[in-house]
């Protein structure tokens, strides 16, 4: 097992921002991914779904994937 190199958080951020592979600095043995989901229902007018479906077909993804992507993009935009 490889021992993790220790660096400061500032050094970590700098290297990450420069595009360096940071895998050697991360201990993922205890990492957990929160994949808990909750189903919701949203009603859209038919003309709205037609536009969503057209865009989803254009870029080659499912309707739900497109909607999720748009929501994530919007949330990231408002958090900054």
Image (cartoon, rainbow, N blue to C red):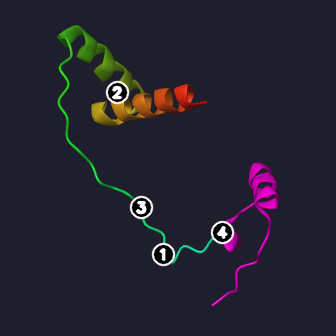
Residue at 21% from the left image edge and 16% from the top image edge: 44
Verify whether residue 46 appears in magenta: no
Asked if disc 3 and disc 4 are in contact, CB closer than 8 Å, the reply is: no
The CA distance from mark 4 to mark 2 is 36 Å
Name the spot of residue 61 as percent of width and height, x first. Answer: 36, 35
Asked if disc 4 and disc 2 are in contact, CB closer than 8 Å, the reply is: no
The CA distance from mark 3 to mark 4 is 17 Å
Name the spot of residue 52 as percent of width and height, x first. Answer: 32, 20
Residue located beneath label 4 in the image: 23
Judged from this view, the residue extending furthest toward the top is 47
Q: Nearer the viewer, mark 1 or mark 2?
A: 1
Q: Is residue 59 above or below residue 25?
A: above
The CA distance from mark 1 to mark 4 is 14 Å
Q: Quadrant of residue 3?
A: bottom right
Residue located beneath label 1 in the image: 30
Residue located beneath label 3 in the image: 33
Secondary-structure class at tag 4: helix
Magenta-drawn segment: 1-25
Name the spot of residue 71 as percent of width and height, x first. Answer: 41, 29
The CA distance from mark 1 to mark 3 is 10 Å
Mark 1: give few (<14), some (14-19) or many (20+) Cα within 10 Å: few
Mark 2: give few (<14), some (14-19) or many (20+) Cα within 10 Å: few
Residue at 55% from the left image edge and 31% from the top image edge: 79
Towards the viewer: 79 or 15: 79
Mark 4: give few (<14), some (14-19) or many (20+) Cα within 10 Å: few
Verify whether residue 6 appears in magenta: yes
Q: Quadrant of residue 41?
A: top left
Q: Which mark is residue 57?
A: 2
In the rendered structure, which disc, 4 or 2, sits on the residue that comes first in sequence?
4
In this rendering, would 53 be left or right of 42?
Answer: right
In the rendered structure, which disc, 3 or 2, sits on the residue that comes first in sequence?
3
């Amino acid at each position: 097992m490889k021992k993790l190199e220790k660096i400061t958080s500032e050094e970590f951020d700098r290297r990450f921002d420069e595009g360096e592979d940071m895998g050697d600095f991360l201990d993922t043995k205890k990492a957990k991914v929160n994949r808990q989901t909750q189903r919701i229902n949203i009603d859209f007018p038919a003309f709205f779904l037609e536009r969503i479906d057209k865009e989803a077909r254009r870029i080659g993804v499912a309707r739900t994937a497109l909607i999720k992507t748009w929501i994530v993009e919007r949330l990231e935009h408002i958090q900054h």
